[in-house]
Image (spheres, rainbow, N blue to C red):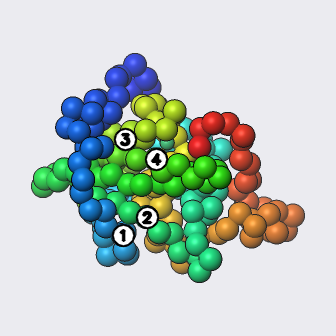
Amino acid sequence: MKSRRNVENLLAEEAETQHWNRRKTQFQRLTSADLLDFSEITEKDLKILFTGSYQLSQAISYLAEMMNESGKIILYYLKTSENQNNTIIKILVRSKHINSKTYKCYIDYTCHSVSYSGIRRYVCDCPNGRCTVGCCSHIAAVIYYLSHARYLSKIIRPAEILSHLFTAEEVYPVINDDSDED
Ligand SMILES: [Zn+2]
């Protein structure tokens, strides 16, 4: 991962030169039958990809807040590029703040890969979205969902985590920094 530190975010440039943001394409609602070629990643590997357990807990917390009343995650996506080996998807992530700005996340992944090595590149149009080591909370939430959470029987809501805080050992803290990150 360290080798990526000084690497320009090429996916950001590609999105700009290809005018992906301006393209008027219909987004599809993500169903359980979509993007099944996305890597399945264990929590241990997600921690490596996100550079720590704190970042993983942030992703879980962010995702839980995207849930609707019936416990469903509604995401909209489209494929901006696709070939036999890799696919680039664009996913819309609604900010959890009141202004509810929608961020555009791009993820370039190797189809049917194992582990986090299949996540080739990613970029988001939020202020922290161009990092190449670790990632912003939007990208983290999307990767966590596509690679792991949607295979779980249930995604834990932050309120439930809080209510279990004093009884369970293995609990992810729900800490929301008041940063402008999201
Ligand atoms: Zn972002």
Helix, strand or loop for disc 1? strand
The x and y percentages for residue 80 are 22, 51
- Circle 1 sits on which residue? 29
* Circles 1 and 2 in contact, beta carbons < 8 Å: yes
Residue in view at x 32 percent, y 33 percent:
12
- Circle 4 sits on which residue? 103
The x and y percentages for residue 82 are 17, 53
Helix, strand or loop for disc 3? strand
* Circles 4 and 2 in contact, beta carbons < 8 Å: no
User: Closest to the observer: 68 or 26?
Assistant: 26
Q: Earlier in the sequence, mark 1 or mark 4?
A: 1
- Where is the N terminus found, in terms of image quarters? top left
User: Closest to the observer: 44 or 96?
Assistant: 96
Q: Amino acid at mark 4?
A: Tyr
The x and y percentages for residue 117 are 34, 45
Q: Earlier in the sequence, mark 4 or mark 2?
A: 2
Q: How far is the residue under mark 2 from the one under mark 3?
A: 17 Å
Q: How far is the residue under mark 3 from the one under mark 4?
A: 13 Å
Query: Which of the 4 image quadrants contains residue 62?
Result: bottom right
Q: Earlier in the sequence, mark 3 or mark 4?
A: 4
Q: How far is the residue under mark 3 from the one under mark 1?
A: 20 Å
Q: Amino acid at mark 1?
A: Arg
Residue in view at x 37 percent, y 75 percent:
32
Q: How far is the residue under mark 1 from the one under mark 2?
A: 6 Å
Which mark, residue 75?
2
Question: Under 8 Å from ligand 1: the CB of mark 3?
Answer: no
Residue in view at x 20 percent, y 37 percent:
18
- Residue 181 to residue 33: above or below: above
Query: Which residue is situated farthest in the top direction here?
Result: 6
Mark 2, mark 3: which one is toward the viewer?
A: 2
Can residue 59 be spotted in the picture? no
Q: Amino acid at mark 3?
A: Tyr
